[in-house]
Amino acid sequence: MQKANFLLLLLVGVAPCAMAQSFSSGSTGADGALSCSLVADACPCPAVQLPASGILNYTTVNVGPSCYLSFSPNVTNTPVTMLATGAVTIAGRVWVGYPTSSYLTAPGPGGFYGGAPGQNGVGPGGGITGKTDGTQNGKWVGPLGLVPIIGGSGGAGFSIPGGGGGGAIVIASSTSITVTGSIDASGGAFSNAGYGANGAIRLVSNSISRSREVRASRRRPVSTAY
């Protein structure tokens, strides 16, 4: 069985130039700069605790090579919204998938739980228990514009729980986003239960550059210059 890929929406304002320069992420900068790098001996990055709103207000974001950035969910398990007044550089890995340190039935931030044994998966596209035609797997169900953004639905449980859905993240920068590493919103997967659906990623900036492939079932760049 093969899991559905997560959605990726890239919004790039490059023409006309005045429009590109006018975009603001809305970050207050209250959380300061987020930086983890091998040079600073700060890898792996400590998991970032999401506030109740799910909104992080940074000045700049730098995830160095070989570094791994994850997030601790808040009580309502909202998606991650990472705003920056300056540049966002991701040379390592940003993870909003299922919690790798816990049972795979849990979701990423903004995702939905896998079903208990014999129960359907949670979420608008939750997997259906007792099925073997693919409908046991969770599906991503949400607006294609990713506004509001939503994570993946959980897989159905059989004799064991279903996989949790991948989370969802918005990354917005008033200047630029550069990805030479990866951003991952994978859902959990068990061999004998429904898979959790992968989540969603939305990048918004005046300039977006990436050199690594990001899995996506759909790509909707606004500008042909992307």
Image (tube, rainbow, N blue to C red):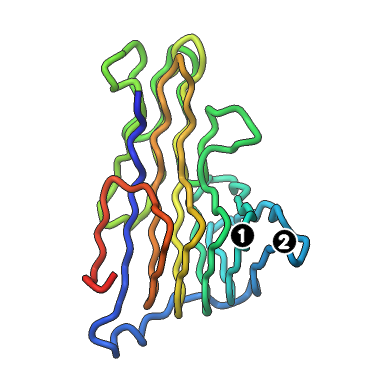
Disc 2, SS: loop
Q: Residue furthest front?
A: 211
Dot 1 surroundings within 10 Å: few (below 14), some, or many (20 or more)? some
Question: Which amino acid, mark 1?
Answer: Pro
Can you say whether 162 is above or below 90 in the image?
Answer: above
- Disc number at residue 65? 1
Horizontal side, residue 219 vs residue 190: left or right: left
Question: Which amino acid, mark 2?
Answer: Leu
At x 41%, y 26%, the residue is 195
Spatial separation of the CA atoms under disc 1 and disc 2: 8 Å
Can you say whether 151 is above or below 221 in the image?
Answer: above
At x 39%, y 63%, the residue is 203
Q: Residue furthest right?
A: 41
Q: Which residue is mark 2?
A: 38
At x 38%, y 76%, the residue is 207
Which mark sits nearer the N-terminus, 1 or 2?
2
Which quadrant of the figure has residue 2? top left
- Residue 37 in percent (x, y) is at 69, 63
At x 58%, y 69%, the residue is 61
Q: Nearer the viewer, residue 12 or 118?
A: 12
